[in-house]
Amino acid sequence: MADRRGPLAMPIRSAGAVVWRPGPDGGSVLLIHRERYNDWTFPKGKREPGEHVLATAVREVQEETGHRVVLGRPLGQIRYASSGYPKVVDYWAATTAGGPDCSGGGFTANEEVDRIGWVPLAAAPARLSYERDAGVLAGFAAGPPVTVPVILLRHARAGRRQDWPGQDLDRPLDAGGAADADRLAPLLAAFGRCAVVSSAAERCVATVRPYAALTGVAIEVDPRLTTERGAGDTAEQQALAGEAAVAGQSVILCAHRENMPGLLAAACTRLGAPEPAGQPLRKGSWWVLHTADGRLAGAEQHEVAS
């Protein structure tokens, strides 16, 4: 077996979260204690083969603390060596899935984590065992603890337009696209229960249908997102994105390649922020704009297979 150690080795990918709940003096964050290392740190763990990093973060926090969480704004990556191996950990802000006021959970001590504790935010830097964790906490404390996601999602794969004999609005997802829609559902659910607004095109509605079924929300079809050819009514699409950005409600807008640049630009303009850097959205990929009090608090871009 090849030795993975050294600066050129493929890093071990992990993910976790700074889980927050409200309270006096800035609220509290959830820390874990590991008897093996006698340390206090944030819940995190290694990504399983083929697992999306968003799924890793949610799964590892639940496994280590008993709390299922909803992810908020990204807190970036930290890099360090663990037992001589390079390691990269992605962190998010998070609240418990029952809401920021929910303190329930089903923690059971195990061989990895023997204790967990809600620690006041002001006291947490002194409790943490690692300077790198203190840096993550500082990034969390520098922004809003709770944000509202506005998700801009491009529909999944639907084959070629020229190969579909019917109306373009009726063109369905192909087999790969349908599989991607199923994979998307829990990944989008990592950001909570969102309203869903879709183009009337079947390929868009089908992309969000598994998520809607998983979370129990209805799909709202909005004609402003619907286009058969070309970009549609750009002014109406931009108005929709701007309204969604400042509404203070978690929402997914599912639309077409032609819509995406205008939707992103309009949302960021309404939030008073420059557009985040990123690649044009591929089929089945999405932006998450994390908003708070009508401002942009963070942004991230994901692909279903990443």
Image (cartoon, grey):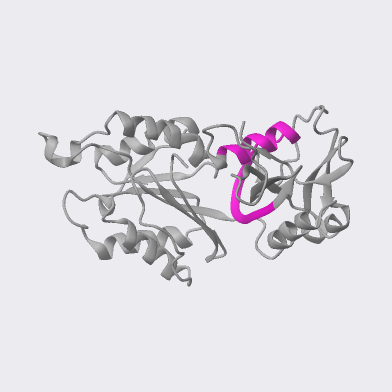
Where residue 56 sits in the image (x, y, percent)? Answer: 60, 38
Front position in the image: 198 or 114: 114
Left or right of 71? Residue 251 is left
Q: Which residues are magenta?
A: 55-79
Front position in the image: 44 or 48: 48
Where residue 66 sits in the image (x, y, percent)? Answer: 73, 32
Residue 94 visible in the displayed image: no
Residue 144: image quadrant is bottom right
> Is 185 above or below relative to 142?
above
* Residue drawn 48% across the image and 71% down it: 273
Residue 244: image quadrant is bottom left
Count up the numbered dots: 0
Front position in the image: 61 or 7: 7
* Residue drawn 28% across the image and 50% down it: 256
Residue positioned most to the left? 165
Residue positioned most to the front? 2
Left or right of 216? Residue 47 is right
Instruction: Check if residue 61 falls in the magenta segment.
Output: yes
* Residue drawn 44% across the image and 37% down it: 184
Left or right of 110? Residue 90 is left
Where residue 229 sits in the image (x, y, percent)? Answer: 16, 52
Instruction: Check if residue 27 falls in the magenta segment.
Output: no
Front position in the image: 199 or 278: 278
Where residue 62 sits in the image (x, y, percent)? Answer: 68, 34
> Is 102 above or below relative to 183?
below
Residue 128 visible in the displayed image: yes
Left or right of 207? Residue 251 is right
Question: Which quadrant, please, contains the N terminus?
Answer: top right
